[in-house]
Image (cartoon, rainbow, N blue to C red):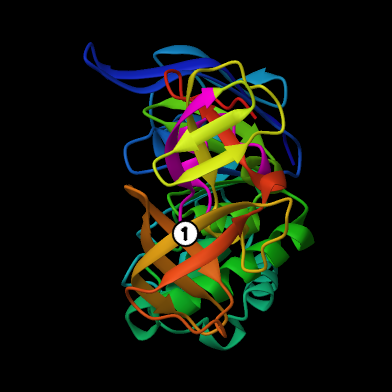
């Protein structure tokens, strides 16, 4: 078990290419930390620097209180699980899982004990004699996880390990990873571009953009209190609606919306943020009201999404699936004023 600290860490691949820019992040012992962001944001590079697979241009990385910048990967006592599984095709499941222990000179008795215990945790007991080609994608991913578990590392580093799985298997494996984290009581650092994975798995989420850390907080705080438009738009599915508004004292006006703000925001031009799930079908006197012209609708069983226009602005609203709506209808919806967001149009930082 270990804490991990990035102190002003930068990684430059060239003078013009900065993958990670001045990253400072503290990960607690036994925490499940998720680094999330789009492709190219620097999250995998941050993980690879911790593993020792990439050199650090500037700054320090510590495991517990030990600086590991110059430490060889094998001495860092961390285990990395890759997206590609990286299994040896000619070896059995048992031998794949035991390979790291064999390289460390572990006894046959110790290897047998650790592999069987990891196989029990991952439900691979009946598959130890098989070769990777005889396994499904989900089983191969569990073997890759098992190979990491048997090493009993101080920290697990997982680089988009579910990306190659189908949607149903991703959900199942996501749940298994959370159970595994609880059983092992070890630090997990997990990289993904999938905000649903981040929201459901992480004790805290670190959102990255263009190599720069944007916000670190528990999932609920990230969702409820995003620090800027980037975080607000990245976290949440479908993404938050953004409506340009002019602000005068407590009043904000968009092309098809006018509402009274709870307080004077101190900006003349803002961006109003409303999540699709924060519209109200039953309008009260305290609610702002929009008139949505429906262009497309999607019924997804428990949810119904309306895509349309409010004035000249595009907008998505999630409504009760029992609500009878057709394309070209106009639907009157209230805005939950307690869940409203406002961003400075110039800086894109959150006002409230």
Of residues 198 and 26, the one drawn nearer to the viewer in this rendering: 198
In this view of the protein, which residue sits in the foreground, 127 or 6? Answer: 6
Q: Position of residue 179 (x, y in %)?
A: 72, 66
Q: Quadrant of the N terminus?
A: top right
Compared to 253, does 239 lie above or below? Answer: below
Disc 1, SS: strand
Tell how many labels: 1
Q: Residue at x 36, y 49 (%)?
A: 311
Quadrant in which residue 42 is drawn: top left
Which residue of the protein is positioned furthest toward the front in this rendering?
285
Please tell me which residue is depicted at 57% across the width and 65% down the height of the picture.
146
Could you say which quadrant of the image residue 76 lies in?
Answer: top right
> Which residue is at the front of the view, 177 or 311?
311
From this viewpoint, which residue is outermost toward the bottom? Answer: 126
Which residue position holds label 1?
291
Name the residue nearer the viewer: 214 or 114.
214
> Which percent across, then down, holds residue 19?
34, 25
Q: Is residue 230 covered in magenta?
A: yes
- Which stretch is magenta? 224-247
Residue 32 shows up from this direction: no
Residue 220 in the image: x percent, y percent? 70, 48
Locate residue 186 relative to residue 144 in the image: left or right.
Answer: right
Is residue 214 one of those drawn in magenta?
A: no
Question: Residue at the spot x=58%, y=41% of the render?
Answer: 78
């Amino acid at each position: 078990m270990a804490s991990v600290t990035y102190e002003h860490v930068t990684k430059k691949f060239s003078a013009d290419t900065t993958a990670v820019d001045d990253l400072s992040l503290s990960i607690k012992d036994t925490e499940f930390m998720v680094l999330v962001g789009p492709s190219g944001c620097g999250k995998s590079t941050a993980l690879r620097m911790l593993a020792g697979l990439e050199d650090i241009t500037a700054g320090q990385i510590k495991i517990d209180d030990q600086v590991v910048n110059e430490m060889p990967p094998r001495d860092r006592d961390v285990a990395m699980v890759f997206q590609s599984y990286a299994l040896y095709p000619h070896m059995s499941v048992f031998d794949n899982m035991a390979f790291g222990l064999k390289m460390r000179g572990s006894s046959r008795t110790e290897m047998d004990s650790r592999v069987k215990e990891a196989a029990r945790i991952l439900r691979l007991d009946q598959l130890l004699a098989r070769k990777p080609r005889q396994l499904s994608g989900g089983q191969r991913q569990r073997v890759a996880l098992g190979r990491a578990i048997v090493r009993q590392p101080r920290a697990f580093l997982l680089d988009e390990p579910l990306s190659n799985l189908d949607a149903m298997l991703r959900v199942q494996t996501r749940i298994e990873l959370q159970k595994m984290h609880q059983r092992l009581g070890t630090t997990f650092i997990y990289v993904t571009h999938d905000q649903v994975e981040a929201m459901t798995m992480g004790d805290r989420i670190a959102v990255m953009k263009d190599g720069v850390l944007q916000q670190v907080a528990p999932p609920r705080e990230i969702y409820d209190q995003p620090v800027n438009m980037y975080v607000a738009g990245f976290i949440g599915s479908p993404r938050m609606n953004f409506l340009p508004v002019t602000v005068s004292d407590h009043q904000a006006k968009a092309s098809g919306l006018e509402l009274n703000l709870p307080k004077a925001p101190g900006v003349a031009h803002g961006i109003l943020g409303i999540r699709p799930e924060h519209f109200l079908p039953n309008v009260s006197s305290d609610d702002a009201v929009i008139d949505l012209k429906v262009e497309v609708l999607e019924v997804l069983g428990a949810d119904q999404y309306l895509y349309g226009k409010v004035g000249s602005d595009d907008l998505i609203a999630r409504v009760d699936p029992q609500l009878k709506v057709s394309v070209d209808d106009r639907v009157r919806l209230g805005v939950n004023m307690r869940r409203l967001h406002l961003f400075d149009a110039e800086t894109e930082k959150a006002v409230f």
